[in-house]
Amino acid sequence: MTRPPIDQQITFLYAEEPEASWKFYEEVMELPLVQDQGMVRIYGVDGARALLGVCRARGPRLSGDPRIAGGVIFTFVTREVEAWHAFLTGKGLALAAPAFSAAHGITHFFLEDPAGYRLEVQRFERPD
């Protein structure tokens, strides 16, 4: 049997105060709003195949450390890591400079959204 196609992929993040997160993704990251479902807003990530949904949380997080409960790092992969860094620092974000990780063969930097999710902007440096 042939594997059926997957048309799109959505990662959902939950925020107790989603209005701040919605503003961040719309105004700071400048992601296009694809669909507003009231309690959930879904954003395009430079194409129609990957989407980011930011939802109103139904309760508080069990921990402030996203690696312990419901943890996620949302990674934006781009060849333009330095340009993204300049774009975001130009919007007033204080960010560490992009760094090369020999262990992973990537150049990247991290930031945090208003709900405390860790975001990464990354470029693969290995030819494979």
Image (cartoon, rainbow, N blue to C red):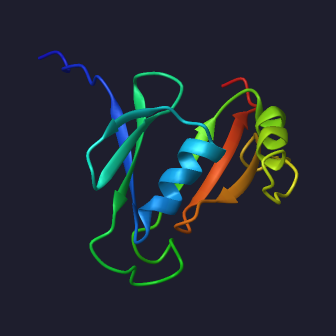
Residue found 35% across the figure and 40% down from its top: 10
Give x and y (percent) for residue 83.
82, 33
Residue found 71% across the figure and 46% down from its top: 104
Q: Nearer the viewer, residue 10 or 53?
A: 53
Q: Quadrant of the N terminus?
A: top left
Give x and y (percent) for residue 68.
46, 77
Q: Quadrant of the C terminus?
A: top right
Give x and y (percent) for residue 38.
27, 51
Against 123, residue 59 (above or below) is: below
In this rendering, would 37 be left or right of 98?
left
Against 124, residue 85 (above or below) is: below
Which residue sits furthest left?
1
Q: Nearer the viewer, residue 14 or 26?
A: 26
Number of numbered discs present? 0
Q: Quadrant of residue 93?
A: bottom right
Residue found 83% across the figure and 60% down from its top: 94
Against 82, residue 101 (above or below) is: below
Residue found 57% across the figure and 64% down from its top: 114
Q: Quadrant of residue 31?
A: top right
In this rendering, would 3 be left or right of 69?
left
Give x and y (percent) for residue 105.
75, 40
Against 16, residue 25 (above or below) is: above
Q: Nearer the viewer, residue 1 or 13?
A: 13
In this rendering, would 45 be left or right of 89?
left
Which residue sits furthest top?
2
